[in-house]
Amino acid sequence: MTVPADSSAHRPRTAPALSRRAVVAALPVATWGTAHATPAPAAPPRRTVAYVGSRTTADREGKGKGIEVYDVSPGGEHWTPLQTVELDNPTFLATDRTRRYLYAVHGDFTYVSAYRIAPGSGRLTALGRQETGGRNPAHLAVDPSNRFLVVANHSSGTVATLPLLADGGLGPRTDLLSLPGAPGPHRTEQTGAKPHHVPFSPDGRFIVVPDKGLDRIFTLTLDAESGKLGFGPVPSVATREFAGPRHIAFHPRLPYAYAIDELCSTVTAYHWDAGRGALEARQILSATAPTTTGDSRGGEIAVGPDGRFVYASNRGGAGDGSPGGPEPDTIGVFRVSARTGLLQPVGWTSTRGIRPRFFCLGADGRRLYAANERSHTIVSYDVDAATGQLRPVGEVVRTGSPVCVLFVRPTSYAS
């Protein structure tokens, strides 16, 4: 049952205020009659919970069950299964800004679902679902005010907004925006608009939407009161033909953003004008190694937290319908110039598997996790702080068709 939206539904969620008694209790107590205060005990290592979304349907050759929940050891080497939430194609996951609720889009379907994250355990409880107004939602993001969920409907060429309710559930759709433009030249992959990513810019003013079908990257605005979408002062920028821009990642300090182009496996560096919400291409590099001669599709892109390196995944084959392989796929490492923001290739590392549709970095940037969709593994790597190079470490997590990994720390969702 859908909970109707009301004036309390759009309140930004904030952490509860501490009482005076709680504050006083938290203050250090002096040790009388001794020269030194008693040292506080060492804090225990912080727990991390990993949520893994997967492909589940036969037409996608999915071997997953839904969302798998894992307890991850402090070093990230060991993953212990906690829960399986069975559902269809939860292909991308996101939390709200308080990390108390989790949302999932369902690839090839028409809806998004909501879950409560249990304090202490990280287990999920379903809160219901809502229609997105389009087909095959591929990505989602919560706006900075914590009032709306933004969703990219990949197969319908639209971007939708849905309100976040006070209990963490979702209200009926508030807006649906179609992306205009002429399709690119690829006969099967560019039949119309195909937005694949809806991240917010670093200052939260714009939503930046790479569109694989139109060879464009759009810049949208969101009214945080009404949930209505609009186009920014510079509505879009054209990419190179056949590029098929898929995902984009912003630099933490420099006015730059980096896109992974799916159809031609390239990385494009853009200068970002934050005032106008405008992108200007400055550099295009191959995402694959110079010795790569077969077909490849770009998957994911990320910038390290310190901004020194960019990472991009490459998936062998000619799209999701091809088997991929037989050789393992790769993640390319690129050094960022602190002066110009441009990239220099460092090297390529095997993902030790097939079809890395997704990878992510840990919060401190010291570890990278590659999700190999077709070989059903998540592989962990140490990141060399000096060179950016990757070294496989820890256990290989074996799970069906992983396509998204989301880490949440207990303090993020404790009540």
Image: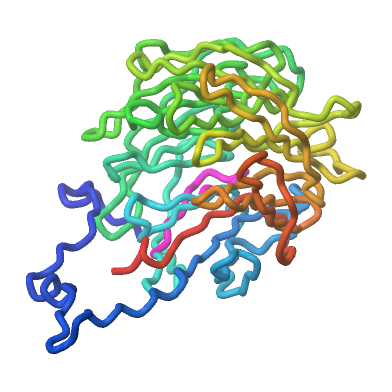
Q: Residue furthest front?
A: 35
Image coordinates for residue 186, horizontal then vertical, percent:
75, 17
Asked whether residue 26 is drawn in magenta, I would say no
Image coordinates for residue 338, horizontal then vertical, percent:
52, 24
- Judge from the rendering whether residue 409 lies leftward or rightward of residue 403; answer left or right: left
164 lies above or below 283: below
Q: Locate the N terminus by quadrant.
A: bottom left
Q: Residue furthest bottom?
A: 33
Q: Which residues are magenta?
A: 105-116
Image coordinates for residue 198, horizontal then vertical, percent:
47, 33
Q: Locate the C terminus by quadrant.
A: bottom left
Front-lying residue, 304 or 182: 304
Front-lying residue, 43 or 152: 43
261 lies above or below 5: above
The residue that appears at 34% across and 24% down in the rendered structure is 221
Report the coloring of the rendering: rainbow
The residue that appears at 64% across and 70% down in the rendered structure is 78
Question: What kind of secondary structure does the magenta stretch mostly adopt?
Answer: strand
Image coordinates for residue 116, horizontal then vertical, percent:
39, 64
- Judge from the rendering whether residue 230 lies leftward or rightward of residue 269; answer left or right: left
Q: Quadrant of residue 150?
A: top left
Q: How many marks?
A: 0
The residue that appears at 39% across and 32% down in the rendered structure is 202
272 lies above or below 73: above
Q: Quadrant of residue 76?
A: bottom right
